[in-house]
């Protein structure tokens, strides 16, 4: 008899036995009139028949009917059942016990449905544990642990705390910062690069679009260790390619990266030292982990893909029996809490910012002052550039502050009445800036972010 860990999340169902991944099934279904496809088979054809593709049945798990279903009686639960059935028939063994790792966004009635589906498939579920708690309870970490994950349709930050017992305290989401929208933005980036270089648009044909989406994860893996990636699409008329830099991928996703970083800021208290744990899905986002590593008073830990499911299986004895099993949101910690006064990585020299981000657009910082405000006087514009700030004028001056590079460092100089703030602290005249710093202009004002682009 073996214990199998199974992570349930819309991006993929990941199953682990004895620490080894035995399945990773994308949460996609294709409502083909000739036969339902789920998992990898559905993902391999989703761009060929986009009208028939469904990918929210785990996120929106319920008994409600699907609007796009050919048969109006097909429900989200039916598709979840079909996918779990295919997976279990492929990997299940007689006598296997299963521990489920579920995200903090899964509601109790959805968990009840998932357990009902598992029971109908004769899966012996002996425990259910929060994904973040399972993945983080075995880590050597601070008393406060933040777990950041990105699903198909949203990003999730789980805050946990405790010296001997790691307990889930709260769950925050960024509802529009999911993998699906980021992959779409990167597909558009690849398409535009190919059009510029070869005049070939891979998004113009279903077959080449499908190929692009299937190759995208591999290109992202390359960017984890390289500054650029060569992308290529093969068609009946030849091979078409382009070279795209990692910073281009990062800038294309900046609007969603900003939401992920804001989740981290919102999940910690001012001056608190925390451990930030990134899921493998977050770690695969080009250049994001480098930006998160720049945040002050923060230890960064990267989890492997199998971490939640493997940890859930190993902790089966601590999760406890029950019929049905209750959701566990706290586990004993395997290591002592890192000392409050312990070492935290300092911001490296490479963390000097090169751009400031406003509404998803990056503006370069150089030796000439970049003047931020609702307007700018002639004297300021004579020696620099202007970045006009839209939105409510309360607390923002016409020429509020300026950014400039000097002797290799970047500084902000305040010219305002209402104040310029760096990471919540008011600037007294002038202050040095680092990549990852948050610049608030005015009171209540708006927030901009400083980033380093190689």
Image (cartoon, rainbow, N blue to C red):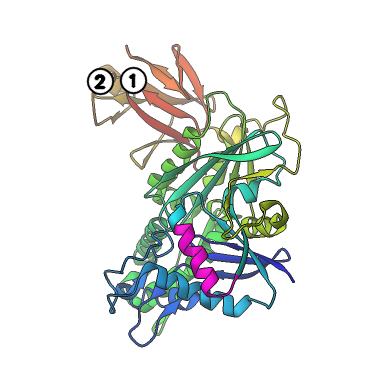
- Percent across and percent down for residue 323 are 59, 60
Q: What residue sits 67% from the left and 77% below the top?
A: 93
Residue under circle 2?
Answer: 394
Is tag 2's residue or tag 1's residue first in the polypeptide sequence?
A: 2
Q: Residues within 10 Å of mark 2 (few under 14, many from 20)?
A: few
The quadrant in which the N terminus is found is: bottom right
Against 424, residue 295 (above or below) is below
Taking depth in this image into account, of 447 and 33 the one nearest to the observer is 33
* Left or right: 67, with 355 as reference point: left
Assign the magenta stretch its main secondary structure.
helix
The residue that mark 1 highlights is 442
x and y percent of residue 215 in the render? 49, 69
137 over 269 or under it: above or below? below
SS class, disc 1: loop
Compared across the picture, whether 3 is left or right of 409 comes to: right
Say above or below: 36 vs 138. Answer: below
Residue 113 among magenta residues: yes
> Is the Cβ of the residue at disc 2 closer than 8 Å to that at disc 1?
yes
Which numbered dot is residue 123? none
Name the residue at 48% across, 25% down. Answer: 423
Q: Is residue 201 visible?
A: no
Q: Which residues are magenta?
A: 110-123
10 Å neighbourhood of mark 1: few (<14), some, or many (≥20)?
many
Residue situated furthest front in the rendering: 323
Q: Relative to 200, is 139 on the left or the right?
A: right
């Amino acid at each position: 008899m073996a214990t199998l860990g199974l992570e349930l999340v819309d991006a993929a169902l990941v199953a682990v036995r004895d620490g080894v991944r035995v399945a990773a099934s994308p949460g996609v279904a294709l409502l083909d009139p000739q036969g339902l496809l789920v998992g990898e088979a559905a993902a391999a054809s989703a761009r060929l028949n986009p009208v028939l593709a469904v990918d929210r049945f785990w996120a929106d798990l319920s008994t409600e009917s699907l609007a796009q279903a050919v048969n109006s009686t097909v429900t989200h639960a039916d598709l979840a059942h079909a996918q779990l059935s295919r997976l279990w028939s492929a990997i299940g063994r007689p006598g296997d016990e299963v521990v489920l790792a579920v995200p903090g966004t899964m509601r109790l009635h959805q968990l009840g449905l998932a357990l009902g589906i598992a029971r109908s498939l004769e899966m012996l579920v002996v425990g259910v544990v929060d994904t973040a708690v399972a993945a983080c309870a075995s880590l050597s970490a601070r008393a406060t642990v933040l777990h950041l994950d990105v699903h198909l349709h949203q990003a999730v930050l789980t805050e946990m705390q405790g010296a001997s017992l790691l307990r889930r305290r709260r769950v925050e989401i960024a509802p529009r910062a999911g993998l699906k929208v980021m992959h779409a933005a990167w597909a558009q980036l690849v398409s535009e690069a190919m059009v510029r270089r070869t005049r070939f648009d891979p998004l113009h044909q279903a077959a080449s679009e499908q190929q692009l989406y299937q190759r995208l994860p591999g290109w992202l893996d390359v960017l984890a260790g390289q500054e650029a990636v060569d992308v290529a699409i093969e068609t009946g008329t030849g091979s078409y390619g382009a070279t795209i830099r990692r910073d281009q991928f990062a800038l294309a996703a900046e609007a969603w990266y900003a939401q992920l970083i804001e989740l981290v800021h919102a999940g910690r208290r001012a001056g608190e030292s925390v451990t930030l744990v990134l899921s493998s899905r977050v770690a695969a986002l080009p250049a994001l982990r480098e930006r998160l590593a720049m945040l002050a008073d923060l230890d960064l830990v990267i989890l492997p893909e199998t971490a939640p499911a493997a940890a859930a299986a190993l902790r089966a004895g601590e999760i406890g029996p029950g019929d049905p099993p209750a959701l566990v949101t706290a586990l004993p910690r395997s290591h002592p809490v890192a000392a409050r006064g312990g070492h935290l990585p300092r911001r490296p020299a490479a963390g000097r910012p090169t751009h400031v981000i406003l509404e998803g657009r990056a503006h370069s910082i150089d030796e000439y002052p970049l003047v931020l405000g609702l307007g700018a006087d002639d004297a300021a514009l004579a020696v620099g550039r202007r970045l006009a700030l839209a939105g409510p004028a309360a607390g923002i001056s016409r020429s509020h502050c300026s950014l400039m590079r000097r002797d290799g460092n970047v500084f902000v100089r305040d010219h305002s009445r209402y104040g310029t703030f760096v990471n919540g602290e008011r600037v007294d005249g002038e202050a040095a800036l680092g990549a990852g710093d948050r610049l608030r202009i005015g009171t209540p004002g708006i927030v901009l972010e400083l980033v380093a682009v190689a």
